[in-house]
Amino acid sequence: MSDSTTPRTRRVCLIVNPSAGGGRAARRLPEAESALRELGIQVRAERTRSLQHAAELAADAAADGEVVVTLGGDGLVGRVAGVVADCDGLLGVLPGGRGNDFARTLGIPKDASQACRVIATGTERRLDLGEVDGSPFIGIASCGFDSDANRIANEAPAFLGNLVYAYGALRALLAWKPAHFELRLDGDEHSFSGWSVAAANSKAYGGGMFLAPDAELDDGALDVVISHRSSKRRFLRSLPKTFKGTHVLEPEVDVRRASEVHIAADRPFAVYADGDPIADLPATVRIRPGAVRVLAPS
């Protein structure tokens, strides 16, 4: 392990998505740089042009022994985490997007200066990493109704903030028709008609919706949340329950555990993970236990 992983000599490459959170990440950058330097950390900032560019920056930084720290949304975290895992580097996260669900789940503060303290004094944890057809994600990969809702949310005006997720769900609900899904969970076949399938490495997505309340970032398994067919009225009534995770008590919701999930459907869907499209069905989701080293609150 290089000296860059000890707080006293830690060197940081801060990878920033300037458009994340409607420009929130760019606005937080000066405060984050100042806070890190006050904590005795050597920091250089790199602004990303795309997720691919972010991956390239992360690979170079990890190879140079720097701690790779993201300032942006969950999509940036997931993509960079995959690179850091492959390099056996060390990842830090500063919230800068709209949802910030990974930071929320890990207990990283929203406040930029407080989050920087985690980079300086946090505890290194080995966390699981998900993959959809080989592409990495850190939180939840889902498809079906979620595909439509995510697409609409990503196209929504930035001024809606976290409300884009509720906006996306309500807009998607108007045109939704049930889909038929074929699943293979660690070899076991399962088919159903309904709303969606989600393979969860983490508990939350969509800006605080606890879709998989029992999922853990370091348990070596995916929580597979299956939403069976129900009326639109019942679905709408259950939607607020996801913010507390109590929707899993509803009879139309089934939660299973697996290390590998193959998903197919009777019509085209994109798989969204960490808020971004990552693959098209049919697709296979896998878990990589303990694949990435992450700085977490002590």
Image (cartoon, rainbow, N blue to C red):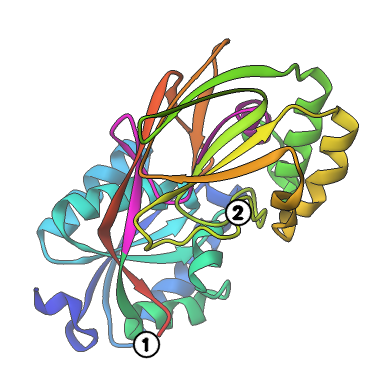
Q: Is residue 190 above or below residue 154?
A: above
Magenta span of residues = 127-153
Mark 2: amino acid: Gly
* Outermost residue, top side: 267
Residue 269: x %, y % from top left: 54, 19
Q: Position of residue 230 (x, y in %)?
A: 80, 29
Q: Closest to the observer: 101 or 194?
A: 194
Task: Name the mark on residue 29.
Answer: none
Task: Determine if the magenta segment contains residue 142.
Answer: yes
Instruction: List the residue tagged with mark 1.
Output: 38
Residue 31 image offset from top left, x and y in percent: 49, 74
SS for dot 2: loop
Q: Circle 1 — which element? A: helix
For the point 42% across and 78% down, the residue is 116
Disc 2: which residue: 99
Q: Are marks 2 and 1 in contact (CB under 8 Å)?
A: no
Classify residue 118 by image quadrant. bottom left
Task: Determine the residue positioned at 74% across, 57% down.
Answer: 246
Residue placed at 79% from the left, 18% from the top?
A: 175
